[in-house]
Image: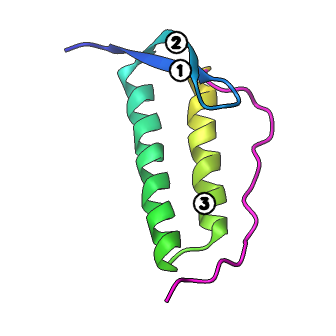
Amino acid sequence: MATTVDINLNTFDDEGNQVDTTTETLPVKQVSDIIDHAAQLLVILQSIERGDSGIEDYDLAISELHDAMLMADLASDDPLPTLTPVYVPLAG
């Protein structure tokens, strides 16, 4: 069984166009940790959409994903922006 995984990381310009790709080799355990946190973030975003979670849950999840990426040397430790609640009336 492989002990490392190659992952591709894309860089985008201000208009959302992919401008570069780099490949990083990470231990399977780190890749699993990043995927776990990314999946949890998506679950929380869906929960926020339903009104079951708040923005604090998002901030915690994105912070945990950021920490996992820091441990893998895939992110800088610059502070992450937090989301502020914005009232958006629902159609209906």
- Disc 2, SS: strand
* Residue at numbered disc 1: 10
Q: Residue furthest right?
A: 79
Badge 1 amino acid: Asn
Q: Residues within 10 Å of mark 1 (few under 14, many from 20)?
A: few
6 relative to 41, above or below: above
Q: Residues within 10 Å of mark 2 (few under 14, many from 20)?
A: few
Question: Could you tell me how far apart the alpha carbons at marks 2 and 3 are, in whole angstroms?
Answer: 28 Å
> What span is in magenta?
74-92
**Alpha carbon distance from label 1 to label 2:** 4 Å
Q: Quadrant of residue 28?
A: top left
| Tag 3–tag 1 contact (CB < 8 Å) | no
Instruction: Identify which residue, 62 or 49, lies in the foreground.
Output: 49
Between marks 3 and 1, how big is the CA–CA gap? Answer: 23 Å
Residue at 73% in and 72% down: 86
Q: Nearer the viewer, mark 3 or mark 1?
A: 1
Amino acid bearing label 2? Thr
Residue appearing at x 49%, y 79% in the figure:
52
In terms of sequence position, does the residue under pointer 2 or pointer 3 come before the other?
2
Which residue was labeled with disc 3? 58
Image quarter of the N terminus: top left
User: Disc 1 on helix, strand or loop?
Assistant: strand
- Picture layout, residue 86 above or below residue 32: below
The answer to whether the residue labelled 1 contacts the one labelled 2, judged by CB atoms less than 8 Å apart, is yes
The residue drawn where x is 25% and y is 13% is 2
User: At which x and y percent is residue 17?
Assistant: 58, 25
What residue does disc 2 label? 21
